[in-house]
Amino acid sequence: MTSPGTELEPAVLSMRGIHKSFGDVEVLRGIDLDVRRHEVVALIGASGSGKSTLLRTANLLETIDDGQVFLSGTDISDPRVKLDAVRARIGVVFQHYNLFPHLSVLGNVTLASRTVHRRGKAAAEKHALELLDQIGLADKAREFPDRLSGGQQQRVAIVRAIATDPELLLLDEITSALDPELVGEVLELVRTLAQGGSTIVMATHEMAFARDVAHRVVFLDGGLIVEQGSPEQLLGHPEQERTREFLARFT
Ligand code: ADP
Ligand code: MG
């Protein structure tokens, strides 16, 4: 995808010198990452390289041991910052267990806008139904998640994440748990959001998708950003041996 002049856009997310250990194991060893408005960044790397932890620290779902996280210029890692207010500005979708099983599709999609953003029920539902209609799932609004396919569930999870108009969308291997035939519909929705100007950081093993949709690909290994660049550069002409070794597994 051609870059929308992202170098001129302000940084939505800035991670500075992020360190994170679990016990004796240092999982993030000094991460510096800037993501600009309208930018789509694909995070790639082997299992255990720290992708999920990076995304979780970006949203402060994990505490950090050192460093700072800025959201649109505000230091959200400052302990005085109210995390609920910060998280309301970031949409997150994980690999598994995204939807609340005891709530209908509509209940899931409207929950955050009603509780966090204090939208009225009617306004939240109207907005949710419009979004569901755009992805062809308006007729499922009253269903419970277990009546939907995995692909439909992930699309609803994405819609739930964007229902509050977040500044930033974090997607953590959102197609990894899906049957292969359901992956496409979820990726198509991400592509639509990317083309619509959403700011996205996505951990993914879908290299073809990353090449197609991301503006920048970041390769993580052992809790460090080893190499990053445009999809053509990083996926086509990696400079680092570790990047080449990793990518060789996908061809
Ligand atoms: P990835 O998403 O790239 O597979 P993760 O960020 O999930 O990598 O994990 C990086 C490392 O951190 C792994 O060694 C993993 O076992 C460890 N790890 C992740 N979360 C925890 C946790 N809550 N407690 C202990 N270790 C963890
Ligand atoms: Mg992970």
Image (cartoon, grey):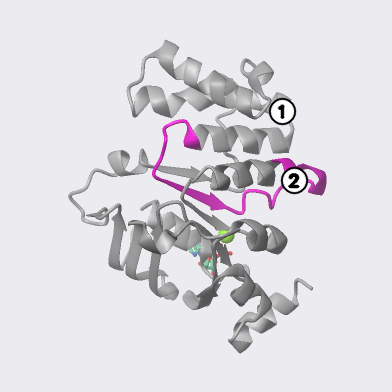
Q: Is residue 87 left or right of residue 193?
A: left
Image quadrant holding the N terminus, namely bottom right
* Residue for point 33% across, 56% down: 10
Q: Is mark 2 on a helix, strand or loop?
A: helix
In reply to whether residue 85 is colored magenta, the answer given is no
Q: Can residue 102 be seen in this view?
A: no
Q: Residue 164 carries which label?
A: none
Instruction: Tell me which segment is drawn in magenta.
Output: 162-185
Residue 147 place in picture, x, y as percent? 72, 24
96 lies above or below 118:
below
Residue 66 place in picture, x, y as percent? 29, 69
Q: Is residue 76 left or right of residue 245?
A: left
Furthest toward the top, the residue is 122
Going from the N terminus, do you reach mark 1 or mark 2 first? 1
* Separation of residues labelled 1 and 2 (CA atoms): 16 Å
82 lies above or below 32:
above
130 lies above or below 122:
below
Cβ at disc 2 under 8 Å from ligand 2 = no
Q: Nearer the viewer, residue 51 or 33?
A: 33
Q: Where is mark 1, residue-wise?
A: 148
Q: Which of 18 and 181 is in front in this view?
A: 181
Q: Nearer the viewer, residue 136 or 151?
A: 136
| Mark 2 residue type | Gly
Q: Residue 184 carries which label?
A: 2
Q: In this view, does 237 lie to the left or right of 224?
A: right
* Residue for point 28% across, 64% down: 68
